[in-house]
Image (tube, helix red, strand yellow):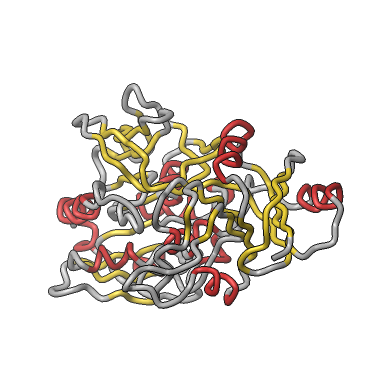
Amino acid sequence: MSKAFFVLDDGRIFEGKSWADTGKTFGEAVFQTGMTGYQETLTDPSYHKQVVVMTAPHIGNTGVNNFDNESQKFWVAGFVVRNPSTITSNWRSENDLEAALIAQGIVGIQGVDTRAITRHLRDRGAMRVGIFSGEDLSREEMVIEVRKQSPMSGAYLAADVSTPQTYIVPAQGQKRFTVAAIDLGIKAATPRMMSERGIEVHVMPFNSTLEDILNISPDGVFLSNGPGDPAAMNDTIELVREVLTEEIPVFGICFGHQILGRALGFETYKLQFGHRGINQPVIDKRNGKVEITAHNHGFALKAPTDEGFSTVFGPGQVTHICLNDGVVEGIELLERGAFSVQYHPEAAAGPHDAAYLFDQFVEMMQKYPRMVAQR
């Protein structure tokens, strides 16, 4: 087992051992605080172009299986663990984690203090990083290579992760609604949870037009999670404005939350180190209820949290706030069917506190059906 290096663009280097595939890889260094759910993390398209540091010390205990995949491939740019499990102990396991990483060419590193890395990123912020294993480079050469990489700010990544053509996830049981889901990096659990509620989900490419959406006569439009900088998504932001003008109900999560916010006229900004994990406390300002939620985002929405706001689409309000740092976690329009949250109600993996939001989407489509009938 050869040496490997985790090299940050501020010059900090952590030495470990090669693990998973060998070679070199680059991305944004981020940390994930979940003690479980590593397979869902690996297959989440929102982690595209990111090198994920797992803060929990033991990773790989339960192996991997086909059912828990959130997409058809691993999306992370690199994977960092402290102590990978030497055995797989779970009746659902179909493969060893390291073998799966090697099969998909994911460069990793083990034997580094992932909690020390996490503290460093919390202090200094998310930054560019490289993993080098089996590479004969000096420390200075590695840092220079890392600094040549593009930052996440300004990144336009939806085209990399979106479906190339529309596909349909049928409603389970009796069909009640049709939803156009704009795929900005959607996770498989999301349309599955909508289908469980009688929704036929048309998962559509990121560059779909209003005409494409209207052609399926949807009862609602869903804006998915995904990677990149929301400020770079001008065409999608304009599409959402067109959908709101048509008065079609809209529900957005994560990246989709940021897109809806920008469509309403708000700005987004890069968080110092983001929220990534399955244990993030969020309070619903409307009733004081606290939910433990699953997050994966490096950008956030600027919106007034003390009082309501006005938009060209009517009045609205911030509905949810993160209790850790006050970040806006949810918004809604008060006189039109549109709301969004910054976190993941499908909770794959994670707690199920926020699953009711899919029911809220159903209630909203029932409340605002008129435009579908008019078309």
Residue sitting nearer the eye, 245 or 288: 288
The percent position of residue 356, horizontal first and vertical second, equals 20, 50
On the image, which quarter does residue 104 sit in? bottom right
Give the side of residue 306 with respect to residue 87, left or right: left
Picture quadrant of residue 215: bottom left
Q: Is residue 330 above or below residue 360?
A: above
* Quadrant where the N terminus is found in the figure: bottom right
Q: Please determine whether, in this image, residue 265 is positioned above or below residue 236.
A: above
Residue 374 occupies quadrant: bottom left
**In this image, 17 relative to 309: left or right?**
right
- Asked whether 109 or 239 is in front, the reply is 109
Q: Where residue 98 appears, x then y in whole percent?
A: 54, 69
Q: Residue at x 71, y 54 (%)?
A: 130
Residue 155 shows in the view: yes
The x and y percentages for residue 165 are 46, 76
User: Above or below — where is 240 with respect to 127?
Assistant: below
Considering every residue shown, the one lying at the far top of the view is 306
Which residue corresponds to the image point at 31% horizontal and 73% vertical from the top-left?
A: 91
Q: Is residue 185 visible?
A: no
Task: Residue at 28%, 50% (x, y): give it.
Answer: 351
Residue 221 rendering spot, x and y as whole percentages: 33, 59
Among all residues in the image, which is located at the extreme left?
A: 174
Say which of 10 and 119 sits in front.
Answer: 119
Where, quadrant-wise, is the C terminus in this rendering?
A: bottom left
